[in-house]
Image (cartoon, coloured by chain):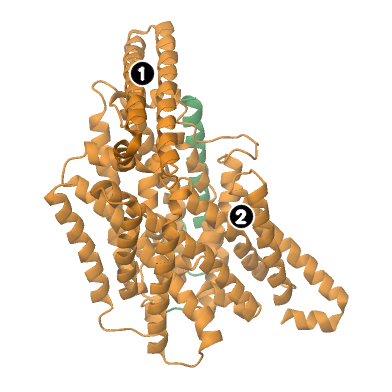
Amino acid sequence: MKEPTDDEATGLPGLRTWRRVYTAVLAVFVAWVVLLAVLSAVYA
Amino acid sequence: MNTLDYLILLGSLLGIAGYGIWKTRSGSDLNTYLRGTGKTHWLTIGLSVMATQASAITFLSTPGQGYESGLGFVQNYFGAPLALIVVAAVFLPLFRRLKVYTAYEYLGHRFDSKTRLLGAGLFLVQRGLGAGITIYAPAIVLSTVMGWRLDATIVCAGLLVVVYTVCGGCDAVNVTQKYQIGLIFAGMVAAFAVLISSMPSGLTIPEALTLAGGFHKLQAVDFSLSLDRRYTIWSGVLGGMFLALSYFGTDQSQVQRYLSGTSLRESRLGLMFNAVFKIPMQFFILLLGVLIFVFYQFERPPVYFNQAAWSYQVKHGQGEKLRALEAEFSAAHADERRHLQAWIDARRSGDTSAATAASAAAEAALERAQSARERTGAVIRGADPRASANDSDYVFITFILDHLPHGLIGLLVTAFFAAALSSKAGELNALGSTTTVDVYRPFVRSGASDSHYVAASRWFTALWGLVAICFALFANLAENLIQAVNILGSIFYGVVLGLFLVAFFLKRVGGTAVFWSALAAQALVIGLYFTLSISYLWYNLIGCAACMGLSLMVQGALDLAGPGVSGKARQ
């Protein structure tokens, strides 16, 4: 097992730091909530 | 189920059990048995984490939630992505740095052995009982399909899971889960495809959604500030985040999955995979239930989905009442179908007033049908108090058995069992590991050989399996299955999370302060559960906040009492 280091590369194109990965995941979450809120409003 | 279905079911079940035994045939040391080979890829970790959480209950009970209450339950998962980010950024690096077998070992490093024992004990109690509830889920399938008694089915299904789990190790669990979650996805897609193609002729997807919306089934997000409502965006984000943080960060059945990664990167990406896909997965399972609701507005469903219980009571003294209610239900459903057809015709012809009138008439007919259904449930439960309290758990399996072709029925029932075996293997393995590493090894017999602890872990796994079976025999008194699991988790998870957050962020608090504070916080949560009527998700927040707040106060009091007392208490 490798020694864990917080600055270990993510290996993801365009998301080279973990901070960026977390921000992207957060953005996906917000997008889902907005989509579901719109669905609720449209079919209320 | 015909011969083909049984062949698929039995072949797969025996294949999975055989694979687990084959994987562990050469024996393994303690490290491999509890943590795997440490070479797991991020996708395997991601699917394994998902498979451990998405057990047979998720597949069976959640569509029933969608059928009864619509999409609102999806809010329960709104906190998951946020929690997974915190686990990946804070919890995971610490666990890996200390190379712990269980999350509770960390509490021993940070505080003392009694706090480690408390954390492990709270996990063992809540997960041991939760394991019972999740054994109950596949038992529903078998009792419905075979016409067996539910309690006999629980014992048989539970014993099969125990045998497989005791034989399988952590690595076998991870590997098999990857294929089992694939089976689940295939089953979901197949059920979706059959459902869409079975909709009454001419009903388009937008029309089906409009119809579902008219019956208040598409209220996915509720901004209400009422604490009484079970699912709102606020309880979902806040309470759900604390529930998910506890589950993914401190529940050994999950910690064991992601600690098996090759590196920190693999473990983190596995968690982020779940952060991205958890909400859409739950949404589509709920939507499946909503579409089954729409389908059954045109195709008459049984008056009571638990047909085994209904048939039993018809034959044992309640036949007259139940037949009368069934006739009432059929008449109301026929009315509703007629009005819905009129509503569709009016919408298509642009006659708004006729559409509104037809919609109102359909809603009134649905209320009559639901009333007949509720009274049917009351008659069945009145005659047999042990009958399932929530008929919605039987909705999806009824749809599968009545409307899917043979072969596909076998595949879906196999998928249920694959999910059940998979998540149960992970849970029981974690229970056995925690009992061995956090209780047996430090407090009962230290310094024994690896093979002794591996054997002990197998015995403890079997013991917990038997405890789970006993608890499962009483699970049918609980509410909807998936809610029962979450309610149980919420009662204990908040305090366990509080222990870990104190360890991470309140450096001045010592073991004695956090130990007594956690006990007091747990007593408070249990007391509040029996006296308050609030969404259970809030108990995660309350338990965690109480544990952290009390820890600060107790540590403050110990500091005031003098450096001698405080210094001793910090150890």
Q: Colour of chain B?
A: orange
Q: Describe the element under mark 2 as helix, strand or loop.
A: helix
Q: Describe the element under mark 1 as helix, strand or loop.
A: helix
Residue B360, position as x, y percentages in the image:
45, 14
**Residue that carries the numbered disc 2 in the rendered image:** B540
- B415 vs B44: above or below: above
Dots 2, 1 in contact, CB < 8 A: no
Observer-nearest of B293 and A28:
B293
**Residue that carries the numbered disc 1 in the rendered image:** B336
Within 10 Å of disc 2 (Cα), the crowding (few <14, some 14-19, many 20+) is: many
Residue under the point 49% across and 32% down: B219
Q: Is residue B463 left or right of residue B440?
A: left
Observer-nearest of B298 and B278:
B298
Residue B513 position by quadrant: bottom right
Both labels 2 and 1 in a single chain: yes
- What amino acid is found at the position of numbered circle 2 in the picture? Asn
Residue B359, position as x, y percentages in the image:
42, 15
- Cα–Cα gap, marks 2 and 1: 42 Å
Residue under the point 51% across and 69% down: B124
Tell me the mark number nearer the camera, choosing from 2 and 1: 1
> Which quadrant would the C terminus of chain B be assigned to in this image?
bottom right
Q: Is residue B189 left or right of residue B447?
A: left
- What amino acid is found at the position of numbered circle 1 in the picture? Glu
- B1 vs B375: above or below: below
